[in-house]
Image (cartoon, rainbow, N blue to C red):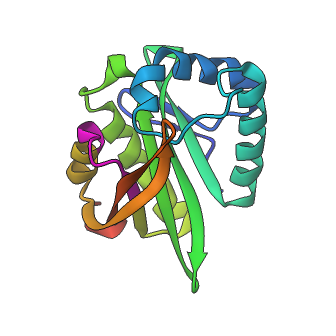
Amino acid sequence: MGPGIRYTDNLILKVENEDSARKVLELYQRNRTAFERFEPTRPNDFYTVEYHRQILAREYKMYISGTFLRYYIFLKMRPCRIIGSVNFNIYHDNDKPFAEIGYKIDALHQNQGLAYEACMSAFAVIKRDYGINRVDARIHPDNEASKRLAEKIGFTPIRLEPKCANILGKYEDLIRYSVNISDIQ
Protein backbone atom coordinates (compact mmCIF):
# COMPACT_ATOMS: atom_id res chain seq x y z
CA MET A 1 0.00 0.00 0.00
CA GLY A 2 1.43 3.34 -1.07
CA PRO A 3 1.28 6.61 0.86
CA GLY A 4 -2.14 8.19 1.21
CA ILE A 5 -0.88 11.64 0.29
CA ARG A 6 1.85 12.99 -2.00
CA TYR A 7 3.02 16.49 -2.82
CA THR A 8 4.49 17.75 -6.08
CA ASP A 9 5.55 21.25 -7.09
CA ASN A 10 1.96 22.29 -7.89
CA LEU A 11 -0.27 19.49 -6.63
CA ILE A 12 -1.52 17.44 -3.72
CA LEU A 13 -2.33 13.81 -4.58
CA LYS A 14 -4.56 12.20 -2.00
CA VAL A 15 -6.33 8.88 -1.48
CA GLU A 16 -9.89 9.71 -0.43
CA ASN A 17 -12.61 7.77 1.36
CA GLU A 18 -16.40 8.05 1.35
CA ASP A 19 -16.29 11.33 3.29
CA SER A 20 -15.24 13.05 0.04
CA ALA A 21 -18.16 11.82 -2.07
CA ARG A 22 -19.59 15.31 -2.62
CA LYS A 23 -16.23 16.69 -3.84
CA VAL A 24 -15.83 13.77 -6.25
CA LEU A 25 -19.38 14.22 -7.53
CA GLU A 26 -18.68 17.93 -8.15
CA LEU A 27 -15.68 17.01 -10.33
CA TYR A 28 -17.86 14.74 -12.47
CA GLN A 29 -20.73 17.24 -12.64
CA ARG A 30 -18.39 20.03 -13.82
CA ASN A 31 -16.92 17.77 -16.49
CA ARG A 32 -19.89 15.63 -17.47
CA THR A 33 -19.71 16.31 -21.20
CA ALA A 34 -15.93 16.13 -21.44
CA PHE A 35 -15.56 12.91 -19.42
CA GLU A 36 -18.54 10.99 -20.82
CA ARG A 37 -17.18 11.21 -24.38
CA PHE A 38 -14.43 8.72 -23.58
CA GLU A 39 -15.49 6.75 -20.48
CA PRO A 40 -17.80 3.76 -20.04
CA THR A 41 -21.54 4.42 -19.95
CA ARG A 42 -22.59 5.55 -16.47
CA PRO A 43 -25.25 3.85 -14.33
CA ASN A 44 -28.44 5.85 -13.75
CA ASP A 45 -27.45 6.84 -10.19
CA PHE A 46 -23.90 7.93 -11.11
CA TYR A 47 -24.56 11.63 -10.48
CA THR A 48 -25.57 11.16 -6.84
CA VAL A 49 -23.59 11.54 -3.62
CA GLU A 50 -24.66 8.07 -2.49
CA TYR A 51 -23.21 6.42 -5.61
CA HIS A 52 -19.82 8.06 -5.05
CA ARG A 53 -19.93 7.30 -1.32
CA GLN A 54 -20.27 3.59 -2.16
CA ILE A 55 -17.57 3.69 -4.85
CA LEU A 56 -15.12 5.54 -2.59
CA ALA A 57 -15.71 3.03 0.24
CA ARG A 58 -15.05 0.12 -2.16
CA GLU A 59 -11.97 1.79 -3.66
CA TYR A 60 -10.56 2.51 -0.20
CA LYS A 61 -10.89 -1.18 0.77
CA MET A 62 -9.12 -2.14 -2.47
CA TYR A 63 -6.40 0.42 -1.69
CA ILE A 64 -5.89 -1.17 1.75
CA SER A 65 -5.70 -4.63 0.14
CA GLY A 66 -3.12 -3.43 -2.42
CA THR A 67 -5.16 -4.05 -5.58
CA PHE A 68 -6.12 -0.46 -6.43
CA LEU A 69 -4.74 3.02 -5.99
CA ARG A 70 -6.53 6.26 -6.86
CA TYR A 71 -5.07 9.63 -6.09
CA TYR A 72 -7.42 12.58 -6.32
CA ILE A 73 -5.64 15.65 -7.58
CA PHE A 74 -5.80 19.04 -5.85
CA LEU A 75 -3.99 22.27 -6.65
CA LYS A 76 -1.77 23.33 -3.75
CA MET A 77 -3.17 26.85 -4.12
CA ARG A 78 -6.76 25.51 -3.92
CA PRO A 79 -6.59 22.38 -1.74
CA CYS A 80 -10.32 21.94 -1.17
CA ARG A 81 -11.36 21.31 -4.80
CA ILE A 82 -10.66 18.08 -6.67
CA ILE A 83 -9.41 18.78 -10.19
CA GLY A 84 -8.79 15.23 -11.37
CA SER A 85 -7.54 11.78 -10.52
CA VAL A 86 -4.95 9.20 -11.47
CA ASN A 87 -5.66 5.56 -10.66
CA PHE A 88 -4.14 2.12 -11.05
CA ASN A 89 -5.80 -1.29 -11.13
CA ILE A 90 -3.08 -3.65 -9.92
CA TYR A 91 -2.81 -7.19 -11.29
CA HIS A 92 -0.52 -10.16 -10.66
CA ASP A 93 0.18 -12.19 -13.79
CA ASN A 94 2.54 -15.14 -13.29
CA ASP A 95 4.24 -13.37 -10.38
CA LYS A 96 4.88 -10.31 -12.57
CA PRO A 97 2.69 -7.55 -11.22
CA PHE A 98 1.47 -4.91 -13.65
CA ALA A 99 -1.04 -2.09 -13.52
CA GLU A 100 -3.54 -0.39 -15.75
CA ILE A 101 -3.68 3.39 -15.40
CA GLY A 102 -6.59 5.76 -15.75
CA TYR A 103 -6.44 9.53 -15.46
CA LYS A 104 -8.64 12.55 -15.85
CA ILE A 105 -8.22 16.26 -15.32
CA ASP A 106 -10.82 19.01 -15.04
CA ALA A 107 -11.38 20.69 -18.42
CA LEU A 108 -10.37 24.04 -16.91
CA HIS A 109 -6.95 22.65 -16.00
CA GLN A 110 -6.05 20.70 -19.13
CA ASN A 111 -2.97 21.52 -21.21
CA GLN A 112 -1.11 22.90 -18.18
CA GLY A 113 1.11 19.88 -17.49
CA LEU A 114 -0.80 18.97 -14.32
CA ALA A 115 -1.91 15.49 -15.44
CA TYR A 116 1.69 14.74 -16.44
CA GLU A 117 2.95 15.96 -13.05
CA ALA A 118 0.37 13.81 -11.22
CA CYS A 119 1.08 10.71 -13.30
CA MET A 120 4.84 10.95 -12.86
CA SER A 121 4.47 11.28 -9.09
CA ALA A 122 2.08 8.32 -8.97
CA PHE A 123 4.43 6.19 -11.09
CA ALA A 124 7.09 6.55 -8.40
CA VAL A 125 4.67 5.05 -5.85
CA ILE A 126 3.58 2.20 -8.11
CA LYS A 127 7.19 1.21 -8.76
CA ARG A 128 8.55 1.64 -5.23
CA ASP A 129 5.64 0.46 -3.08
CA TYR A 130 3.93 -2.08 -5.36
CA GLY A 131 6.94 -3.43 -7.27
CA ILE A 132 5.32 -2.66 -10.61
CA ASN A 133 7.32 -1.84 -13.71
CA ARG A 134 4.82 -2.39 -16.57
CA VAL A 135 1.82 -0.08 -16.82
CA ASP A 136 -0.84 -0.25 -19.53
CA ALA A 137 -3.38 2.37 -20.59
CA ARG A 138 -6.50 1.87 -22.70
CA ILE A 139 -7.31 4.99 -24.69
CA HIS A 140 -10.12 5.89 -27.09
CA PRO A 141 -8.68 6.61 -30.56
CA ASP A 142 -10.36 10.05 -30.64
CA ASN A 143 -9.04 11.13 -27.23
CA GLU A 144 -6.17 13.24 -28.54
CA ALA A 145 -5.34 14.82 -25.16
CA SER A 146 -4.99 11.42 -23.50
CA LYS A 147 -2.88 10.06 -26.35
CA ARG A 148 -0.57 13.10 -26.18
CA LEU A 149 -0.15 12.65 -22.42
CA ALA A 150 0.54 8.92 -22.78
CA GLU A 151 3.13 9.53 -25.48
CA LYS A 152 4.77 12.34 -23.45
CA ILE A 153 5.13 9.92 -20.54
CA GLY A 154 6.68 7.30 -22.82
CA PHE A 155 3.78 4.93 -23.52
CA THR A 156 3.73 3.23 -26.92
CA PRO A 157 0.65 1.77 -28.62
CA ILE A 158 0.72 -2.02 -28.68
CA ARG A 159 -2.65 -3.12 -30.08
CA LEU A 160 -6.18 -2.19 -31.02
CA GLU A 161 -8.92 -3.69 -28.83
CA PRO A 162 -12.02 -3.69 -31.07
CA LYS A 163 -15.47 -2.88 -29.67
CA CYS A 164 -14.39 -3.45 -26.05
CA ALA A 165 -15.87 -0.42 -24.23
CA ASN A 166 -19.49 0.66 -23.96
CA ILE A 167 -19.31 4.44 -24.29
CA LEU A 168 -22.57 6.39 -24.45
CA GLY A 169 -24.42 3.16 -25.25
CA LYS A 170 -22.21 2.14 -28.20
CA TYR A 171 -19.33 -0.35 -28.19
CA GLU A 172 -16.13 1.46 -29.19
CA ASP A 173 -12.56 0.47 -30.01
CA LEU A 174 -9.74 1.30 -27.61
CA ILE A 175 -5.99 1.33 -28.15
CA ARG A 176 -3.84 -0.40 -25.55
CA TYR A 177 -0.63 1.45 -24.72
CA SER A 178 2.18 0.16 -22.50
CA VAL A 179 5.28 1.53 -20.77
CA ASN A 180 8.00 0.17 -18.51
CA ILE A 181 8.43 2.65 -15.66
CA SER A 182 12.16 1.97 -15.52
CA ASP A 183 12.39 3.36 -19.06
CA ILE A 184 10.91 6.74 -18.08
CA GLN A 185 12.49 7.53 -14.72
Relative side of 126 to 59, left or right: left
In which quadrant of the rendered view does residue 80 lie? top right
For residue 11, say whether it is visible: no
Q: Position of residue 46 (x, y in %)?
A: 66, 28
Reply above or below: 73 against 141. above
Residue 162, above or below 106: below
Q: Quadrant of the N terminus?
A: bottom right
Please state if 9 lies on the left or on the right of 50 as rendered: left
Left or right of residue 55: residue 184: left
Determine if residue 143 is in view: yes
Residue at 70% x, 45% y is 59
Q: Quadrant of the C terminus?
A: bottom left
Closer-to-camera residue (43/119): 43
Of all residues, the one furthest to the bottom in this rendering is 94
Q: Is residue 142 magenta?
A: yes
Where residue 19 appears, as percent x and y from the top left, is 76, 24
- Residue 59 magenta-highlighted: no
**Residue 109 picture location, percent across and down:** 33, 21
Question: Which residue is painted at 58% across and 63% down in the image?
Answer: 90
Q: How many marks?
A: 0
Q: What residue sits 78% from the left and 24% below the top?
A: 50
Q: Is residue 5 above or below residue 34?
A: below
Residue 103 higher or lower than 112, as above or below? below
Task: Identify the residue at image location x=63%, y=42%.
Answer: 4
Magenta range: 137-146
Residue 123: % across, % down: 42, 54
Front residue of this view, candidates 44 and 56? 44
Left or right: 160 with respect to 164? left
For this orientation, the residue located farthest to the front is 170
